[in-house]
Image (cartoon, helix red, strand yellow):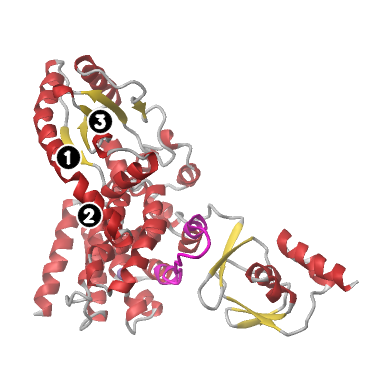
Amino acid sequence: MEGQFEEKLLSSLRTEMKTGRYAPADIALVERAFVFAAEAHSGQKRMSGEPYIIHPVSTAYRLAHMRLDAETISGALLHDVCEDTHVSPKDIRKVLGERIAFLVEGITKLDQVRYRETERDAENLRKMFLAVAKDIRIVLIKLADRFHNMETLHYVAPEKRKRIAMETLEIYAPLAYRLGIGELKGQLEDLAFPYAYPQEHHWLMRHIKDTLEERRAYAARLIPKIQRELECEKLYPKNIHARAKHHYSLYRKLVMRNEDIRNIHDLIALRIIVGTVEECYRALGIIHKFWPPLPGRIKDYIATPKPNGYQSLHTTVFGPEKKITEIQIRTPSMHEEAENGIAAHWAYTELKNNPATAVVKGLPHAKNLAWVSQLREWQKEFQNPEDFLESLKIDFFKDRIFVFTPKGEVLDLPEGSTPIDFAYQIHSQVGDTAVGARVNGRMVTLSHELKNVDVVEILTQKNKKPSQGWLKFVKTASAKKKILSVLRQKK
Ligand code: MN
């Protein structure tokens, strides 16, 4: 029975990869990873009662759909084996190689990052998340992992759901947005919304139901009209579709602007996909000829992309039947990028066929992004995709390190910080009475330089006082200040 179920899962993944024109060797690698994962998880069940392997395969499937490389897909298949089974990174290294083991280890490490509502600000956690991940592909695996966990959240114990949903809203959705994966961001938020804010969700759903249906019907009438007007001008759109606004972002908009649902005009937006940038502007002109735009509502994100690289033309018009409607116009590659974000920059097929254009394509407009210009710099140095993927390490936060308490809480410190800086960051009492430190289980001096992802434990002794000598090596201004103030008191 289990064998049949597994065969079905593998064959769906294989089909998706064939559709994406992956090379036979890459499909073979993913199949080996599948066999390894199925073996390791054999006998385990999800909360839903289904065989566990369905979860890693769902995660891998989504990444294959985004056309990420075979290593990432394999890493996704194995992402939970070190956590949940007897398998060690060493075993993975032996069977599937160094690079897949590296991805899996990265994910396991990332799982130490815990979110608490009362804790430090979410922005810091997001940064730390990226710094700990070391490789953007690890973050992408984590996002796909979270997506499937959110889809199946109703199987999880009720008291855990809210925390997981809040974490999704605060950490994962913004990360997806930052990486330009707008579609995933919206989906994650909508999956989390009912668990994070049940009453608000209920209220919204009750209030938009009629309006939404009426708007859908209207969009269905409008699409053929637009199609006709464009074709009359010899412009043949590749696709026109209606798109409902994501619930959570709609809710935020209502709350933040204190608006009435009837005045939200983008409940359903129409999206027109045309062949070229030039056709985008032409389509906009044609639409405005028939339906005048609302003043101040034309947005040219092609000339001025959003900071995460998003491009499109947006307009809000007085449409037929005197209804106000939002319309978005973009090219297929803008659409692809809006859906897949950073992943679109090294989509598998393009990378294999032409590594240079795969990365350069779509980049010039996104020059505002630090990571994009960094990618571009790196890309210049590498002739083949292998080396390029290898180079996708995250070091945007070069000047900060992120270290853990033995309980898994996270502190961020400037590079070159010492256990004393760490101790004062926790509490001045801990700093004042520090006598020693253990880093990753080993005793170190108090002037020892901490590294990213170290686990630091401070040993204290009652009635101890800070020493003058500490001032020579502490890095943070706050620790310095506290030490000085105690030293002054002593005098
Ligand atoms: Mn997982």
N-term-proximal mark, 1 vs 2:
2
Callout 2 environment at 10 Å: few (<14), some (14 to 19), or many (20+)? many
Real-space Cα separation, disc 3 to disc 1, in angstroms: 15 Å
> Image height check: is 491 above or below 373?
below
> Residue sitting at 10 percent across and 21 percent down?
228
Callout 3 environment at 10 Å: few (<14), some (14 to 19), or many (20+)? many
Q: Position of residue 112 (x, y in %)?
A: 45, 72
Callout 1 environment at 10 Å: few (<14), some (14 to 19), or many (20+)? few
Residue at the disc numbered 3: 326
Q: Magenta region: which residues?
A: 107-127
Q: Toward the viewer: 212 or 5?
A: 212
Where does the C terminus fall, quadrant-wise? bottom right
Task: Determine whether the beta carbon of the residue marked 3 sits less than 8 angstroms from the nearest atom of ligand 1.
Answer: no
Q: Position of residue 67 (x, y in %)?
A: 26, 52
Query: Are dots 1 and 2 in contact, CB under 8 Å?
Result: no
Q: Tell me the mark number nearer the camera, choosing from 3 and 1.
A: 1
> Residue sitting at 17 percent across and 22 percent down?
322
Q: Position of residue 143 (x, y in %)?
A: 34, 59
Where does the N terminus fall, quadrant-wise? bottom left
Residue at the disc numbered 2: 22
Q: Tell me the mark number nearer the camera, choosing from 3 and 2.
A: 3
> Residue sitting at 12 percent across and 71 percent down?
7
Q: Secondary structure at mark 1?
A: helix
Q: Secondary structure at mark 2?
A: loop
Residue 109 among those drawn in magenta = yes
Real-space Cα separation, disc 3 to disc 2, in angstroms: 38 Å
Task: Determine whether the beta carbon of the residue marked 2 sits less than 8 angstroms from the nearest atom of ligand 1.
Answer: no
